[in-house]
Amino acid sequence: MWKQLAQFVLRYRIVLLILLLVSTVFMGFQASKLQLGYEFGKAIPTDNPKYKEYLAFKAQFGEDGNVLVIGVSDSAFFSPAHFEAYRQMLDGIKGIRGVEGMLSTVAAMNLVKNAEDEKIKAQPIFPEGPLTDSLLSAGEATFRNLPFYIGLLYNPETNAFLAGATINKKILASADRTRVVNELIGFTKTYTEKTGITTQLSGLPLIRTQVADRIKNEMNYFLAGSLGLAVITLLIFFRSISSTLMSMVVVIIGVIWVMGTMELLGYDISLLTALAPPLIIVIGIPNCIYFLNKYHMAWEAEENLNPHLSIDQKKHNALVQMVSKMGVVTLFCNIAAAVGFAVFALTASELLKEFGAVAGINIMMLFFISLIFIPAVLSYLPPPKERHTRYLRNRFLENLLVSISYWVLRRRRSVYLVTGAMLVFAILGIFRLKSVGFIVDDLPKTDRIYTDLKWFEKNFGGVMPLEIVVDTKRKNGVVRNLKTIELMDYLGAYIAAQPEMARPLSLVEGLKFAKQAYYDGDSMSYITPNDFDMAFLGPYLKGQTGGDTTSQLGKLTKSFVDSTKQRARLSVNMADVGTERLPVLLDSLRAETNQLFDSSKYTVTFTGSSITFLEGSRFIINGLRDSIFWAFLLIALCMLYLFKNFRILLCSLIPNIIPLFVTAGIMGWAGVPLKPSTVLVFSVALGIAIDVTIRFLVNYKQELPEHHYNVLGTTVSTIRHTGISIIYTSLVLVAGFVIFMLSDFGGTFSLGWLTSFTLLVATFTNLVFLPALMLDFLGKKQTDKIK
């Protein structure tokens, strides 16, 4: 079958190349329309209860996590020059298209009682226009007398001041968010140049925008660098520009097809689908190396066995031999790799589904690209010269393979002892492995995004949104009596006592503010009103806790109580505590709410971006973990179908489990946690390791009849025939991944060195441990003397 297929490819090579070119141009056109995705909830299934709660929260109260915060530390903040410069900075930010609102000290309002019409009105603390020292001093005294703003807009202990810019949600879900963030940063830089005061910037809009843009730019650089190193390595090995260029064209076509497929399927570039192009390089380069290696071996065999044939005939025979021998190997390698990634499509996470579909489809397409392009192009190129095939007789590698054969034949016990020691070391490391993720944990501790976040955590408790919704289960239940308000106040006090959380903002704080206003601004009156207070305060609040959203309390009501006044919201800013600490904090909060709120009368829900981040990380990690199990199962079925031998199946799976264990163990010893950016290493490692195993075993199966089913002789011959290409492939891929270690992002750095390390372990297990295992599992029938 494969010989006929080789003849077909060579006979219709022009037609096939034209079809490949036309289809690639079409996919390239589709790829040109591909957009970067900015949705962050796709990691969670749409039917997930946490996700539904988050959508319900946004429908009732609006967006959370869309505030970009600006902080300054200034002991002379209320001096005319500094205050005016700060105001000008914020005025500029307010004018940015996409900024919908500003919360700041310069725009702070004071609530004042008007006894004549029995209303509480909002008045600016700092009037518009230039302010004198006396006006600023008076405004400062008023501002510092309002507990409502402590921890919200300023920290009196550190003279730190905060301003919050609300970004339009549609802007945040588009590429235009980069413009908004950059323009805002420009105004803060101007302020710093005028005053010499450094600004701190944080909030999810800034973190997500800058991290995503930097990862995108960095991945482009590293993708180009990885290709560059692969080119250099291929040139050193093959000493052929044409072979190197041909390999690069194959993977570039594969990358174009990946991006075109994403557009055709309606996907955007996401955190995971962005990894599909490097993955195609990982799979595509070995395809090229093995095809070229087999072609060079077949050409030398033709030169030695059929010197009387013409060059064209020898080249034709070598190409037929290449396709017939490597076609089935490459097919099953790509099937196994495609299955390994396509199983992500079976998970509940939309991000993983998209990545699985794109990777699975294009790994298989890569097989057809290689099968058409490489033989067709080689048929037009002159035959390889002696310098092109010299690597086949590399003395160092030949000696290395002889040594490997010796250890497999004579020192198998030592091979097992070394492998066993590696596994023990790995298992001990696995017990140290942790699963934890942070919003900014991939950044170095010296990065400004990280240091600015820590500044806000120190001065204001953090910027990560946590939302708590108290449902009274009846209309007007929030305002019908003070019991609910008192319980929310108790909960707020408990939250404020947590070192990782700031004082929550809610309707309770608005009522405290109103009570202080009623008692003529006495800061001692900033407490929850009781029934006695409400008898006098009630008339002043009428019309201001309902639909009157023009008043200060009306705005607060709209933001923190739903339209039916059945549900109230406590909005908390918290530190980036990570996926390990966050569940502990949430459990403590749930225990407190269970004590405070009678479940027959209240339902308390925890939601917000912090919850969705935790849930999304959990789904990605669990989805990848479960997918590895299903990938192993499906790959095992493919291997069983291919070899139809249970013993060979066991021999094929064990060497692929070992690299995964060793990688997990190394992560434990090195302190690299399991998180979405590192757990993908195992999927890549499995795809690489199983690829090497299939190539070794298929070559073994092909050579077995030639050695009269002599297991020992066939194993040694397979080591010598596949060892060079396996080693070359590993070195090329290591060179491609090592460049990722130059990244400042922890996940990218880990992907580089962990994948490189896994490649080396997989090379050992497949070239040394696998053949040793085969000799003991498959028997030692010897009909010929092994030389």
Image (cartoon, rainbow, N blue to C red):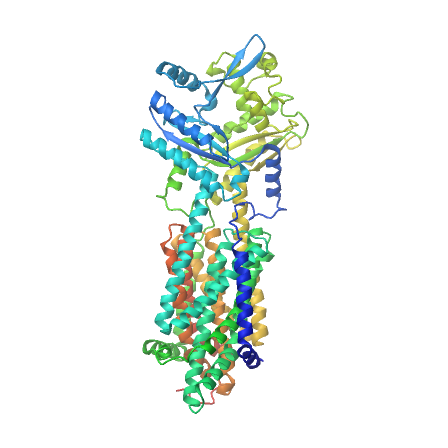
Count of numbered circles on the image = 0
- In the picture as drawn, the residue positioned furthest to the left comes out as 196
| Vertical placement of residue 51 versus 227, above or below | above
Report which quarter residue 629 is drawn in.
bottom right
Between 320 and 726, which is closer to the camera in this rendering? 320
Residue 628 at x, y percent in the picture: 53, 60
Between 54 and 273, which is closer to the camera in this rendering? 273
| Vertical placement of residue 336 versus 562, above or below | below
What residue is shown at x 45% (from left), y 18% (from top)? 125
Report which quarter residue 190 is drawn in.
top left
Dividing the image into 4 quarters, which one contains the C terminus?
bottom left
| Vertical placement of residue 664 versus 309, above or below | above
Residue 428 in sight from this viewpoint:
no
What residue is shown at x 50% (from left), y 88% (from top)? 708
- In the picture as drawn, the residue positioned furthest to the right comes out as 474
Residue 21 in sight from this viewpoint:
yes
Between 528 and 164, which is closer to the camera in this rendering? 164
Residue 378 at x, y percent in the picture: 46, 76
What residue is shown at x 47% (from left), y 32% (from top)? 165
What residue is shown at x 40% (from left), y 27% (from top)? 88
- In the picture as drawn, the residue positioned furthest to the top comes out as 116
| Vertical placement of residue 671 versus 496, above or below | below
Residue 425 at x, y percent in the picture: 40, 61
Residue 143 at x, y percent in the picture: 43, 19
Going by the image, does 395 lie left or right of 361? left
Dividing the image into 4 quarters, which one contains the N terminus?
bottom right
Between 729 and 460, which is closer to the camera in this rendering? 729
Going by the image, does 151 lie left or right of 481? left
Going by the image, does 548 lie left or right of 65? right
